Amino acid sequence: MYAHLNNTVYAMLFDSIVNSYLITHCGMDPFSMNNNSSSDKTTASSNQVAIMVNSYCDYFASVSFPDVLDLGLRVAKLGSSSVTYEVGVFKRGEEAVKTVGGYTHVFVARETMRPTKSGMEEKIRRELEKLMVQPKARL
């Protein structure tokens, strides 16, 4: 109606790209419980779940239906049990970012919903490290 995407659509886009990565690369399967005694490791799931504790969105330019969007995902900060994601929203064919947003997840034990002393599982950490963008050195 207002020739732009509603803010709830951006939240859905951020959630979709982050959770797709967690499921595809980090072994986070929201539909099954981990069974470490299982001999079939292809179906093993993480013992942890990720709880959102913070979110944000900054708007620089509008996009609207039927624009085709490209999303870029990176990890802005990786703590012992938390990760802050950042998502850039681009209109296909244009270089300028339209929206930047993201959120922070805290990884907690699936059974207790509390953080663990050991932090996030190693497989999750390794895969999230692949999305880390190091700041460029200043000359």
Image (tube, grey):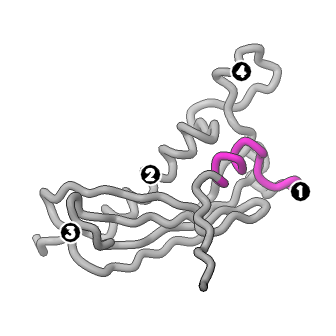
Give the residue at mark 4: 41
- The image shows residue 76, relative to residue 128, as above or below, that is below
> In the rendered view, does 80 fall on the left or right side of 7?
right
- Residue 77 quadrant: bottom right
**Disc 2 vs disc 1: Cβ atoms closer than 8 Å?**
no
Which residue, as the protein is rendered here, is positioned at the far front?
A: 139
- Give the Cα distance between marks 2 and 1: 28 Å
**Which quarter of the rendered picture does the N terminus lie within?**
bottom left
- Give the Cα distance between marks 4 and 2: 25 Å
> What mark, if any, has residue 63 been given in the picture?
3
* Mark positioned earlier in the residue sequence (4 or 2): 2
* Mark positioned earlier in the residue sequence (4 or 1): 4
Q: At which x and y percent is residue 83?
A: 65, 62
Instruction: Tell which tag, 1 or 3, sits nearer the viewer.
Output: 3
Q: At which x and y percent is residue 36?
A: 80, 26
**Which quarter of the rendered picture does the C terminus lie within?**
bottom right
Give the residue at mark 1: 117
| The one of 120 and 139 positioned closer to us in this rendering | 139
Give the residue at mark 2: 17
What amino acid is at disc 2? Ile
* Mark positioned earlier in the residue sequence (2 or 3): 2
The number of numbered badges drawn on the structure is: 4
Q: Residues in magenta?
A: 116-129
Which residue does the image show at 29% across and 64% down from the upper left? 90
> What mark, if any, has residue 104 been given in the picture?
none
What amino acid is at disc 3? Val
